[in-house]
Image (cartoon, grey):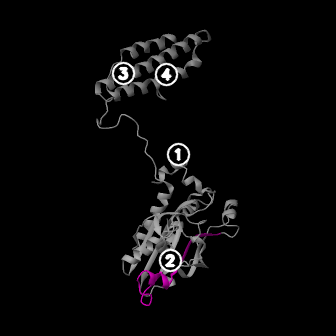
Amino acid sequence: MVDAVKKYFDLVKAFESLEPDEIEAFRISYLGKKGILNSLFSDFRKVPLKEKKSFGVELNKLKTAVLEKVRDLKEVSKKKSGSNKISDPTRSAFKINTGSKHPLSIVKNRIIDIFTQIGFNISEGPEIEDDWHNFTALNLPYHHPARDMQDTFFIETNPDILLRTHTSSVQVRYMENNQPPIRTISPGRVFRNEAISSRSHCIFHQIEGLYVAKDVSFADLKQTLNYFTKSLFGDKKMRLRPSFFPFTEPSAEVDIYWGLETEKDYRITKGTGWLEIMGCGMVDPNVLENCGIDSENYSGFAFGMGIERIAMLLYQISDIRLFFENDIRFLKQFKTTI
């Protein structure tokens, strides 16, 4: 039986080829499931007891010889064919680790896409604002808490120059320079003098929308928001709760039904199942008049939401500070969502 194994050594040694297909066929003929080595191993039980040890040694030597032969032939074949050369001479010699979009950018772009599909354009404005565009034109009285140093970052006083507290100031500038019909959204960064915690930050991002035309009603606002919530959150119920904002009348808060399926749902919805996502309302006639628009002929609605809040809901993020820490362990989780 040992001699039956030894005869294959000469066959292995004699085999020569540089064709990948032939080398692979040679490997399979010896190492495949139905190959020579498996056949010899199956005959192991027929070998006399005194020959088993030497028979096993020869089988292992044959297997090693086949593996070495295949390896050597493949290396020679690669060198001859030149397959070890870089096919693209302009390709970088080093691996390039691609980054990912920030989760706030991902959510902002999704919201922008939803509204641009129904005719809204994008407007932007300065982050450093004056009192008129940030407060007065928006019907905020002089005694309003937002005008206090404790809530707003003032750069100068008399006249007041400050870091904008909302992107509504962009809407004021847009109405001053454009006549109805107006349909615009204003994404941007805003600043408020708040203590930094897991639920609040002194810097955050907003998207506010504005629609001004003839005969705009609250029903138009509701339909627009219903379209938005279904596009972003899926088939979830939406409700409007009466509220108050100085620049809209009537005003409302927008809630979606998040559900009560988990303990976390109970915590973030305070046991109600409903979750606030934005504020909205009909533009106050005083705001239209302040911007040079005739409130007798035109009406409009406005809405605004925090991008961080939407992102925290969509991605189940519990700490707003993660958005600003630039922790690569956090950010790389969004690589597949680009």
- Mark 1 or 4: in front is 1
Please tell me whether mark 4 sits on a helix, a strand or a loop: helix
Q: State if disc 4 and disc 1 touch (CB < 8 Å).
A: no
Q: Is residue 255 left or right of residue 185?
A: right
Q: Which residue is mark 2?
A: 136
Q: Which residue is mark 3?
A: 73
Type of amino acid at the residue the image marks with label 1: Ile
The alpha-carbon separation of the residues under discs 2 and 4 comes to 90 Å
Q: Residue furthest top?
A: 50
Q: Is residue 238 visible?
A: no
Q: Which residue is mark 4?
A: 37
Q: Quadrant of the C terminus?
A: bottom left
- Mark 3 or 1: in front is 1
The alpha-carbon separation of the residues under discs 2 and 1 comes to 42 Å
Q: Name the residue nearer the viewer: 251 or 292.
A: 292
Q: Earlier in the sequence, mark 2 or mark 4?
A: 4
Q: At 52% from the left edge and 16% from the top edge, which residue is drawn? A: 60
- Mark 2 or 3: in front is 2
Type of amino acid at the residue the image marks with label 3: Leu
Q: Is residue 129 visible?
A: yes
Q: Earlier in the sequence, mark 3 or mark 1?
A: 3
Q: Earlier in the sequence, mark 2 or mark 3?
A: 3
Q: Name the residue nearer the viewer: 162 or 91.
A: 162
User: Which contiguous range is marked in magenta?
Assistant: 274-300
